[in-house]
Amino acid sequence: MKRYVVIAATSHETTTEDVSRIHELLTALHGRLGRPLPYHEFVIHPKSFSRTCENIFHLSFLVNSGHVRIAFDENGLLCAEPADQGRGSRSSENPLENAFVMTLSMQQWKDAVEALQLMEPAIPD
């Protein structure tokens, strides 16, 4: 029984660490580029569908907690940015409230990797 508790705590700690790491990376990339990041290019791992799903899951925590904003840019593309950034930017004109759910099939993932010509993940393993 104690082993189960340890495993659960480790899993929670890992999720928390991953969420923090993604927030730090998003903030750093946003600061470097000076604009919101294309959502799909940020979350899609071109070599791993499961890692892509994990990235979407972890980013959703940041959206739900109000640390990240997901919005459409002037071209109608989904973008992500730190919530404390970009006040008055174009991406914040269409915020998607505090909840965000995205579905992605394996075929959609494959199609996106090909269409976006992704070679390396924005969020490293």
Image (cartoon, rainbow, N blue to C red):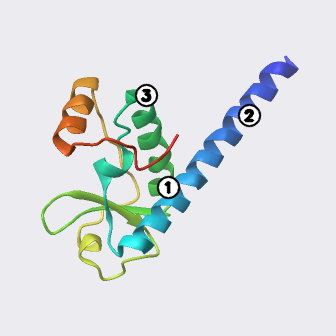
> Secondary structure beneath disc 1?
helix
Q: Is residue 16 left or right of residue 62?
A: right
Taking depth in this image into account, of 97 and 44 the one nearest to the observer is 44
Amino acid residing under circle 3:
Ser
Q: Residue at x 44, y 74 (%)?
A: 31
Q: Is residue 64 above or below residue 50?
A: below
- Dot 2 falls on a residue whose secondary structure is helix
The kind of residue tagged 1 is Leu
The residue carrying mark 3 is: 50
Secondary structure found at label 3: helix
Toward the bottom, the furthest residue is 88
**What is the x, y in percent for residue 55?**
45, 42
3D distance between C-alphas at marks 3 and 2: 19 Å
Which numbered disc covers residue 87? none
Sort mark 2 into few (<14), some (14-19) or many (20+) by Cα contacts within 10 Å. few
Name the residue at 36% across, 81% down.
Answer: 87
Within 10 angstroms of label 1, few (less than 14), some, or many (20 or more) residues? Answer: many
Q: Is residue 65 visible?
A: no
Q: Which residue is mark 2?
A: 10
The residue indicated by pointer 1 is: 62
Which residue is at the front of the view, 76 or 52? Answer: 52
